[in-house]
Amino acid sequence: MVGRLLLGLMLVVVAQPLPHVPVSDAASSVHAFFSLQSTGDCVAFMALFNTNVTITDPFGSPPAHYDDMKAACQTANQSFVKVDMAAGAVSAVGGGAAAKFSVLSITRRSGDVGPCQLNFTGIDTFTFDNDGLITSVVGYFDPSIPGAQSACVDPMCQKVACSNSSECVYMGPEMSCGPQGTCIQHCSSETSCPQSCSSCIDSICTTP
């Protein structure tokens, strides 16, 4: 019975007219959705959306709308020193698409908090109109992960990943990329280290 029901539902769905969006166009829009957030180009980013778009990110949260996304893009440019978002393989059909995404971004320091590294993954689903504009986005990820990561203190003790020292300079001129591929803080004494990693061992601040 369950098998018959599922097959019946599939036939009903297939019979419904879907927006005509070429798979390659849908995939390009999904990749642009993430890459334009990385570059901070809010004008090009907003051009991806139908003005009646709804964004539920993550799933279960109150939906955001076009003006909310515009404000969020502008806020991100002010709140992050680095935004690196990317989509993996995109599965698209008709007027919908889905993709796994990754986030590796760094917030600006605010008071005693940050800069902090956000490092998490999730899945986003998309729908499109006949013009190929995004009409909805639904995100699936655990919001407690970026929430906790964005509230870090003294990130030089948080093992922020790096590939070269230029990626660590935003934390301070005494920062460099260590041999383990994480940002390290150099020191001459324990008094030059932050409280949470106050030991100065081999001229590097270390968690006691």
Image (tube, grey):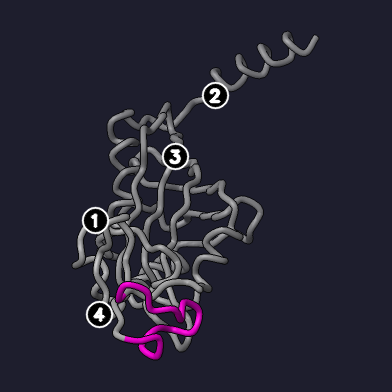
Q: Amino acid at mark 4?
A: Glu
Q: Quick check: 96 above or below 165?
A: above
Total numbered labels placed on residues in the image? 4
Dot 4 or dot 1, earlier in sequence: 1
Question: Crowding near pointer 1: few (<14 within 10 Å), some, many (20+)?
Answer: some
Residue to which mark 4 is pinned: 174
Q: Nearer the viewer, mark 3 or mark 2?
A: 3
In the rendering, which numbered label is found on residue 16?
A: 2
> x%, y% of residue 162?
29, 59
> x%, y% of residue 21?
35, 32
Splitting the image into 4 quarters, where does residue 171 fall?
bottom left
Q: Nearer the viewer, mark 3 or mark 4?
A: 4
Q: Depth check: 39 or 162 in front?
A: 162
Question: Crowding near pointer 3: few (<14 within 10 Å), some, many (20+)?
Answer: some
For mark 1, give the secondary structure: loop
Question: Crowding near pointer 2: few (<14 within 10 Å), some, many (20+)?
Answer: few
Q: CA distance from mark 4 to mark 1?
A: 16 Å
Q: Nearer the viewer, mark 4 or mark 1?
A: 4
